[in-house]
Amino acid sequence: MTVLKSGLNLFLRYNNISLLNCKKPHFSRRYAAHFTYHPDSNYPTDGEKAKLNMYQAITNALDVALEKDPTAVIFGEDVAFGGVFRCTMGLQEKYGKDRVFNTPLCEQGIVGFGIGLAVSGATAISEIQFADYIFPAFDQLVNEAAKFRYRCGNEFNCGKLTVRAPCGAVGHGGHYHSQSPEAYFAHTPGLKIVMPRGPIKAKGLLLSCIEDEDPCLFFEPKVLYRSAVDEVPLEHYTIPLGQAEVVIPGSDVTIIAWGTQIHVVCEAAQIAKEKHNISCEVIDLMTILPWDVETVLKSVKKTGRVIVSHEAPLTSGFGAELATTIQEECFLNLEAPVRRVTGFDTPFPHIFEPFYIPTIWRCLEAITEIVKY
């Protein structure tokens, strides 16, 4: 694979064929998305399971939360009829209009209302329809929710606030329906930030956020809503926040990612093993804040080489925080500088999305280069 740049022209070549110049699509049906979903077989509990996609697993988690906690309420734009991604389907019919209800189109008001509910003792589960539109609520999240416990000496808190938001690339979202804003909030002590990679993790992590004693932002990669399918336990279970998971064990290169990008780097790692005999250890961070320093550093000390990959832009992306901590704590263990494979420092493009996102081939290129350093 080579990338050729000439003025404004950008061509991606694979096996010496220009994908942009093909009269017929060079992609098979499999390449409708930029990744292949890798099912999760790490079940957190035994018992009855059902084949669920990610939005169904989230619906199941919300159903469990509402049934278990009579103070829990769900609110946001269009959630009463199921939401634009159908994650709250049937919940108003089951629990009533007092517990599942619509709000005006006002993100600042949605989060502010949730803070008030949580301070008053309710479990508040709010939905921001797209993560791209969370920014009007930035002040409420950063200056109110995150600081509430601290500023009153723990006399009051809004820890029972969870904010759900669909995020990330989806293939056709353009500027305002594709962004990954996790790094903006990771600079804020007092918040917890979570992003699952599939249905099993989505249910367990969401229930952990809802039951946690701190306000949580739960970012849901929307391209996984229907494309990710697992055998999901139907009973209540949680997955601890702040703990990463080694998805693929390896010995030569550590690759860290989260959300959809886990499936991209898993495929790159498999190709690296099959074609180049490079053993990659893939870590799903899952919780962005607080992140699992111990698991990451243990892997880095073993492999000596690190790649961090995320969809968000390069500059000040959360990968920069990971790279800095790794180089501070593992400098003498590193065989090469930490590499980042990310989105570019541009607004998220529409028709050029395939060139913007950190694809399998960009990740594979980083893997082969870092072992040669």
Image: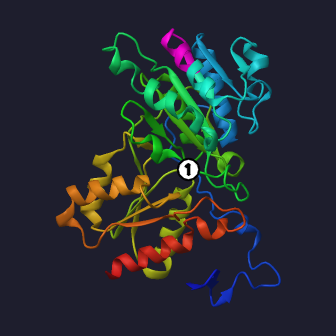
| Above/below status of 328 relative to 243 | below
Looking at the image, which is closer to me, 203 or 136? 136
- The x, y position of residue 305, in whole percent, is 31, 68
Q: In which quarter of the image is residue 324?
A: bottom left
User: Which of the colour schemes (rainbow, by chain, secondary structure, one colour) is used?
Assistant: rainbow
- The x, y position of residue 318, in whole percent, is 42, 52
Find numbered disc 1 in the image and state the secondary structure of the residue it sits on: loop
Q: Quadrant of residue 133?
A: top right
Looking at the image, which is closer to me, 7 or 294? 7
**Looking at the image, which residue is at 36% across and 68% down?**
253
Looking at the image, which is closer to me, 316 or 290? 316
Quarter of the image with the C terminus is bottom left
Q: Give the range drawn in magenta.
A: 114-124
| Above/below status of 141 relative to 124 | below
**Neighbourhood count class around disc 1 (C-alpha, 10 Å): few under 14, some 14–19, many 20 upward:** many
User: What residue is pinned by disc 1?
Assistant: 180
Q: On the picture, is 208 further left or further right than 133?
A: left
**Looking at the image, which residue is at 71% across and 34% down?**
87
**Looking at the image, which residue is at 21% across and 60% down?**
330
**Looking at the image, which residue is at 66% across and 62% down?**
349
Quarter of the image with the N terminus is bottom right
* Mark 1: amino acid: Ser
Q: Quadrant of residue 68?
A: top right
| Above/below status of 132 relative to 137 | below
